[in-house]
Image: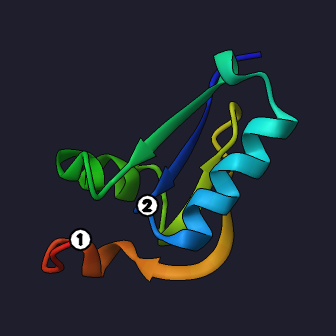
Amino acid sequence: MEHAKLYHIGCAQCVITEKELASLMDSDHLDVINLSEERSRVEEAIMHGVKSVPALITPNGLVLHLNAGMQTDDLAGVAL
């Protein structure tokens, strides 16, 4: 299995989502990207099709929006 990617911004809902996914998946196969800490990766998330966070990109490239969180288009102008 290739890596899945979880994009989030470190909010309470995102942290809960990260912990739940980590309990379900082998951590060697889950890359967690906190966009509030890695702002340079916002464009990467958007290119993958992420519209809001938290979002999981499956190894097959399917985007799963896990909660109606912050829109990625809004991340550029927000101090997190």
Which residue of the protein is positioned furthest toward the right in this rendering?
Answer: 24
Crowd band around label 1 with a 10 angstrom C-alpha radius: few (<14), some (14–19), many (20+) = few
Residue shown at 77%/16% (left/top)?
A: 1
The answer for how far apart the CA atoms under marks 2 and 1 are is 9 Å
Residue 54 location in percent, x, y? 56, 64
Quarter of the image for residue 15 reads bottom right
Q: Is residue 77 left or right of residue 44?
A: left
Residue shown at 55%/71% (left/top)?
A: 12
Residue type at the position of mark 1 = Leu
Q: Which residue is mark 2?
A: 10
Residue 43 location in percent, x, y? 25, 54
Residue 57 location in percent, x, y? 62, 46
Crowd band around label 2 with a 10 angstrom C-alpha radius: few (<14), some (14–19), many (20+) = some
Quarter of the image for residue 27 reads top right
Element assignment for label 2: loop
Q: Is residue 9 left or right of residue 21?
A: left
Element assignment for label 1: loop
Please report contact status of discs 2 and 1: CB closer than 8 Å, yes or no.
Answer: yes
Q: Using the image as rendered, state which of residue 15 and residue 65 is in the foreground.
A: 15
- Of callouts 2 and 1, the N-terminal one: 2
Q: Using the image as rendered, state which of residue 75 and residue 20 is in the foreground.
A: 20
Q: Is residue 39 left or right of residue 30?
A: left
In the image, residue 40 above or below residue 73: above
Q: Which residue is mark 1?
A: 80
